[in-house]
Image (cartoon, coloured by chain):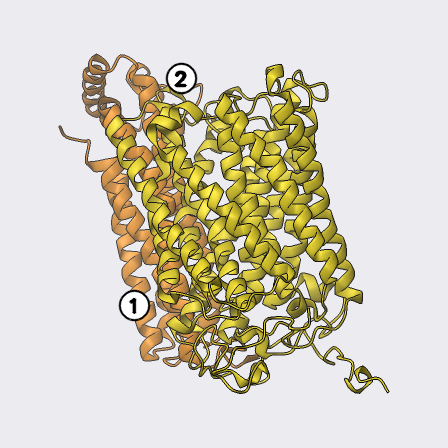
Chain colours: A yellow, B orange
């Protein structure tokens, strides 16, 4: 007689947010934060693959030193549209608008965000902004670089700048509304017992991110509005021919766009802070410090913008101050990294897919962060400014950090979002493919940059070809690493094994409700009586009834 | 989410709902401060670099119209505050009266702004190819709304400014970029505010606002006061501080 036959097969709950109502209207007019998160998931994935297509064109073009594939002008458009699509329409909304939207109310025990209609509005604003930008792309694209530097963007460029600037301007308001909604929700909607220091680190990270969103995004909005009016109506703030100052544009632009880097990385750090305790079966080391580090990054992040402008001829004293402040960002980042590693120490570690992404994040963020210090250093920056070193550095942070965090979080919470598990082994393999492909793509770019290959050029000297071939080969592997999860995650949403309420198990409040959750999230408002990430005093997790003994790793059967 | 009376489903109590709404509005106002902050920075920088042109530009504005509008807006803030107060103490008939007064004052502001803008248009003071800060001085017949002695004064000031800054015309254009950018954004905010006031008017005529629940009046009031405060900064920046040396 088989023993397994005695275990009843898990089934999906009868009522959940996915089958509460049906029809296209029930999705397009939904105010349920979980459905809006899925709307965002679909839209950011769309832009991710658009941006990915442009990236592929860039890498294919750079296979040969003279670049056979694209004309110089088209090449400029390709890297610009790659940046615009990836930064404004994928990285910035990805974790906050998808995972944050879905899980912040669940994690704090609320029925929804404080302003559900504003949440839906933010998605529509995103879509409208995206439509303008898509229009720019299909009407020939723009060639200014994603930074829209003036007066190229306002006077000299003959490409479709105006619709893209309008699109990015509009999309900014979706980010502002998301940040506003999160801040209010975290302040006023916490369940009884969910004190500030019981909040999951994911929520702390989003709190810090939201502060950056509401303080930074309005500044890029007014900056792009002025640049747009300059292009369309001839206002002169940034036009030197009229006495305006292009450096002013750069200051205003980076006042947002540097903190925007933290909009991208802080939520990923929040995800990692959830993954590591869960798969190491240990309480997060230094909870208060990790939370404070998020806020510190948000605050210091606003004081470093001019390190993008060391070679613009700004005052040496200003550059010194900005260099020093840039080094300060490394402190809270290191606090986080060391705390994650300390959490792993002595833990009961399991190598499930989300944890593989977390490990990938740790290594890649470390390299990306430390090379950031090379760039923040005045002397070395002169040497490697505007080279592939910079490209490699920020891809290690943005792709190695933010996208790894996003995919790790997506795998971790997929069973909660859909009620079904993804295929574990395929997922592990694709995480490895992604890691290998990523490093092969971007590590050679550090060398290229150090040797002097400038960014944004469509040709390069023949001696750089070997690194470029490696990079292009890596990009092809990377593409497979992205396509695989998209395929198997979609498949598993319909045909995967039913996951149950808490498959890992993990400690957060989101795992205390059914998978997929009800539209109201919880049947009754939960009352929180436990500390965050505490596996020892949680008999409900079924890990070990005797709290003093060593507890089972996640998926003890592997 | 279901709604029970005025309580939306995601909230447990009206208090929690009110707290969320007003915190949300305050955070929104912070974003507005940052938004106007960007253009004020552009103004401040250019004023520092091109002071003579900015002083000259400032002198072409009508202090009378700007001053009148300042009084109108301050009065509208008073009537708005009275509307909020009426809703808090339950004087239901007073709410729509004060809202209507606020709307009326808002439209008086728009009217004066229209007069100002069209003057600038006729005086060739809108940034663009036809911009000419000397237009009225050189063509007094085309500017019948400026008194001859004012024109004399203006001509003297412009000559002095021209001596200090040979490229006066293009730098004055920056001043007018700031003028239209800032007052235009401010006016846009007023239009949105007027729309919100009409929405409140409808609600107050239906008797929706009570001492127990008047959040919309409260937070639209916050918004309206904020828009006033922006003007309280714009008026001295654009009209006053450069008038006298």
Chain letter of mark 2 equals: A
Q: Residue at x 39, y 81 (%)?
A: B212
Label 2 environment density (alpha carbons within 10 Å; few <14, some 14–19, many ≥20): few
Chain holding disc 1: B
Identify which residue, A253 or B212, lies in the foreground: A253
Q: Is residue A350 left or right of residue B96?
A: right
Helix, strand or loop for disc 1:
helix
Res A384 quadrant in image: top left
**Residue found at the very far left of the displayed protein:** B245
Estimate the x, y position of residue A301 in percent, counting from the top left.
Answer: 37, 46
Residue B180 visible to an observer of this rendering: no
Where disc 2 sits, the SS reads helix
Front residue of this view, candidates A348 and A309 = A348
Q: Which mark identifies residue B82?
A: 1
Labels 2 and 1 within one chain: no
- x, y (%) of residue B148? 22, 22
Residue at image x 57%, y 44%?
A399
In front here: B111 or A248? A248
Residue A274 location in percent, x, y? 51, 64
Q: Residues within 10 Å of mark 1 (few under 14, many from 20)?
A: some
Residue B100 x, y percent position in the rendering = 39, 63
Q: CA distance from mark 2 to mark 1?
A: 50 Å
Query: Tags 2 and 1 in contact by the CB under 8 Å rule?
Result: no
- Residue for badge 2: A241
The relative height of residue A2 versus residue A387 in the rendered view (above or below) is: below
Left or right of A320, for residue A302: right
Q: Nearer the viewer, mark 2 or mark 1?
A: 2
């Amino acid at each position: 007689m088989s023993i397994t036959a005695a275990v009843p097969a898990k089934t999906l709950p009868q009522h959940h947010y996915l089958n509460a109502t049906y029809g296209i209207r029930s999705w397009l007019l939904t105010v349920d934060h979980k459905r809006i998160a899925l709307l965002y998931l679909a839209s950011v994935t769309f832009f991710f693959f658009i941006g990915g297509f442009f990236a592929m064109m860039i890498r294919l073009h750079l296979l040969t030193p003279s670049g056979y594939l694209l004309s110089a002008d088209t090449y400029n458009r390709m890297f610009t549209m790659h940046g615009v699509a990836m930064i404004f329409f994928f990285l910035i909304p990805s974790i906050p608008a998808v995972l944050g939207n879905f899980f912040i109310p669940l994690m704090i025990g609320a029925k929804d965000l404080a302003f559900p209609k504003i949440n839906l509005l933010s998605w529509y604003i995103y879509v409208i902004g995206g439509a303008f930008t898509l229009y720019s792309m299909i009407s020939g694209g723009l060639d200014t670089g994603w930074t829209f530097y003036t007066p190229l963007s306002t006077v000299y460029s003959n490409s479709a700048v105006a619709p893209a600037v309008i699109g990015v301007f509009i999309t900014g308001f979706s980010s502002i509304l998301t940040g506003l909604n999160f801040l209010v929700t975290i302040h006023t909607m916490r369940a009884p017992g969910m004190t500030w220091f019981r909040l999951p680190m994911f929520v702390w990270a989003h709190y810090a991110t939201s502060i950056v969103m509401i303080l930074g995004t309005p500044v890029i909005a007014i900056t792009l509005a002025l640049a747009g009016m300059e292009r369309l109506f001839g206002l002169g703030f940034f036009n030197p021919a009229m006495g305006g100052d292009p450096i002013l544009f750069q200051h205003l632009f980076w006042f947002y766009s540097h903190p925007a880097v933290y909009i991208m990385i802080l939520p990923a750090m929040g995800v990692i802070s959830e993954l590591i305790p869960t798969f190491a079966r240990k309480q997060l080391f230094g909870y208060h410090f990790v939370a404070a580090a998020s806020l510190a990054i948000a605050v210091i992040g606003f004081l470093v913008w001019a390190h993008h402008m060391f070679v613009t001829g700004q005052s040496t004293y200003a550059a010194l101050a900005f260099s020093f402040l840039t080094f300060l960002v490394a402190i809270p980042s290191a606090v986080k990294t060391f705390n994650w590693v300390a959490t792993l120490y002595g833990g009961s570690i399991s190598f499930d897919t989300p944890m593989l992404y977390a490990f990938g994040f740790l290594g890649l963020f470390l390299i990306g962060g430390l090379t950031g210090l090379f760039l923040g250093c005045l002397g070395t920056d002169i040497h490697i400014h505007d080279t592939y070193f910079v490209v490699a550095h920020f891809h290690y942070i943005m792709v190695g950090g933010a996208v790894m965090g996003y995919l790790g979080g997506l795998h971790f919470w997929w069973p909660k979002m859909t009620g079904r598990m993804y295929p574990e082994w395929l997922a592990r393999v694709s995480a490895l493919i992604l890691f290998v492909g990523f490093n092969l793509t971007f590590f050679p770019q550090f060398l290229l940059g150090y040797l002097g290959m400038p960014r944004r050029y469509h040709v390069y000297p023949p001696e750089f070809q070997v690194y470029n071939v490696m990079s292009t080969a890596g990009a092809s592997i990377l593409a497979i690493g992205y396509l695989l999860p998209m395929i198997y995650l979609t498949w598993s949403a319909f045909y995967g094994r039913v996951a149950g309420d808490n498959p890992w198990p993990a400690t957060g409040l989101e795992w205390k409700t059914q998978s997929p959750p009800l539209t109201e999230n919880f049947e009754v408002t939960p009352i929180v009586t436990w500390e965050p990430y505490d596996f020892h005093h949680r008999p409900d997790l079924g890990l070990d009834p005797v709290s003093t003994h060593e507890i089972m790793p996640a998926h003890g059967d592997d | 989410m279901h709604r029970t009376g005025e309580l939306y489903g995601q909230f447990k109590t009206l208090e929690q709902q009110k707290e969320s709404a007003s915190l949300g509005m305050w955070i929104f106002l912070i974003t507005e401060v940052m938004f106007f902050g960007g253009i004020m920075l552009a103004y401040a920088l250019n004023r520092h670099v091109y002071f003579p042109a900015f002083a000259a530009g400032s002198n072409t504005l009508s202090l009378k119209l700007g001053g009148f509008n300042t009084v109108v807006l301050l009065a509208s803030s008073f009537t708005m505050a009275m509307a909020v107060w009426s809703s808090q103490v339950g004087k239901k008939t007073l709410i729509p009266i004060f809202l209507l007064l606020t709307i009326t004052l808002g439209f008086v502001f728009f009217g004066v702004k229209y007069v100002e803008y069209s003057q600038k248009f006729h005086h060739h003071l809108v940034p663009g190819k036809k911009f000419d800060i000397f237009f009225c001085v050189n063509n007094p017949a085309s500017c019948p709304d400026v008194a001859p002695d004012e024109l004399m004064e203006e001509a003297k000031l412009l000559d002095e400014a021209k001596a200090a800054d040979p490229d006066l015309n293009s730098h004055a254009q920056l001043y007018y970029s700031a003028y239209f950018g800032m007052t235009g954004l401010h006016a846009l905010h007023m239009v949105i505010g007027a729309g919100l006031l009409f929405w409140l008017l409808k609600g107050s005529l239906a008797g929706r606002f009570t001492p127990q629940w008047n959040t919309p009046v409260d937070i639209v009031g916050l918004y309206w006061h904020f828009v006033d405060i922006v003007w309280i900064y714009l008026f001295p920046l654009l009209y006053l501080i450069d008038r006298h040396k």
